[in-house]
Amino acid sequence: MTQPRPPMKPTRDPRVTLDDLVEVLLNKGAVLHLDLIVAVADIPLIGVSLRAAIAGMETMLEYGMLNQWDESTRAWAARSAGRRDLELRAGEALVTRMPGGHLLEEGVYTGWRPGGVHLTDQRLVVLRRDPREVLFEAGVRDLRTVQLETETTVGGEQRTRLRVATLDGRTALLSAADPHGLHEALSSLNPALTALPPAPEGTPSGALEGHLWYQEPRRSGPLWRGGKGRLEPTGLVWKSPLDARPGLLVVPDDILGARVEPGRSPGGDGRLVVLETASHGPVTLAAEEPERWAAALEAMGAPNRAGTAHPPTAPSPPA
Amino acid sequence: MALTVDEKSLKHGVLALVLTLVEVIQEALERQALRRMEGGDLTEEELERLGDALLELDEALEEIKEDHGITTSVADLHRGLDEVVDDVVDKLVNPARWAEEAGR
């Protein structure tokens, strides 16, 4: 079972393949007409009338079915086909084109709209082909900054997005198949984009984010759960990927101190982070870098220790 | 015959199965496209667009198979399905086989 089996070798050439069968079915076409009445005591109660046909379009047309629809579809396509691609201005050249999207943030609705990201030597355009709409357009000269941003998607994956800010104060979030390539192409077109210092936003100093284990107190006994921990100036947030809401929220005022203690941690390195809180008592955590977390938490709790009625409990010696 | 979906992982097997079915649909589309092209009422521009789109679809499928490393599994599964169809059609068009089967 564990050994990979050699690939199957054909023992004979099938004379009829599935593809042939499907082709015959579609070329000939199949029609189903079904009339059915369900009656009780000779009184009809339920009627069923089914009409179904499947065939290749060529066969359908031969039998005079779906003619109208075929014509209107093709007529509509012919009308819109001529202007499917981005029209370039005179002297404008396409630099790169890739699938991507634009995050619509106007009004109450926020959502990704897929389209093709076109970069020409003059403009950055996100164009949706069907129905045709220019989702985002900005001149390369009008851009102020273009930054790569990492964002966690609904599915929990890390994706790199492109945050674009224009000189007239608009900002937009774009996605692209190759965000780094697009970013490079943009900065080679307009070196001013990279000459500007990166915006101060991003990870603020003191913010710590990473995988964090939380020993959740439960009625049946404490339970280690893995999740994402994030330490911000507003406090410590821990959330399991399985939960809709954070399982642990500690505001800075609540933190009394933190220390690294020996103990059985799910990570297996035998060190725990014990966070002393004013309202919940000690909270047990485990992280890959317990010292960093403990130091950051300790620093956050420092103002609370000075002159409070809750002095941090001395680390109990390991038994 | 039994269809063997690779037991290495369910994901692998399901993906191979889905792609095999998509391949069957793609093949059907290509053959019908050929018929329509030969039918002669498509314009020059429509012919070109249809050809391009089918080519893109073919490339995309190949890419997906390469990405997931299931080219061989899909080919095996496709061949397996072909053999099942061949068996069934063979039995349908040759009732003598039923007797053979029953006598076995």
Image: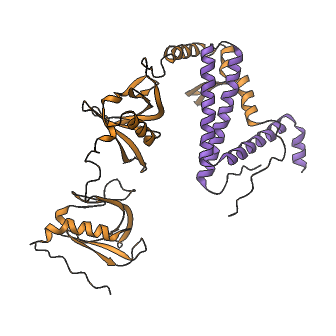
Chain colours: A orange, B purple
| Residue drawn at (74%, 50%) of the image | B2
Residue A41 in view of the camera: no
Residue in front for this viewpoint, A172 or B70: A172
Left or right position of A26 against A88: right
| Residue drawn at (39%, 74%) of the image | A265
Res. A70 image quadrant: top right
The mark total stands at 0
Residue in front for this viewpoint, B46 or A111: B46
Compared with residue A103, is residue B6 higher up or lower down, i.e. above or below? below
Residue A14 locus on image (x, y percent): 82, 40
Residue B29 in view of the camera: yes
Residue A10 locus on image (x, y percent): 80, 46
Left or right position of B42 against A194: right
Left or right position of B9 against A7: left
Residue A106 locus on image (x, y percent): 29, 32
Compared with residue A50, is residue A237 higher up or lower down, i.e. above or below? below
| Residue drawn at (63%, 49%) of the image | B69
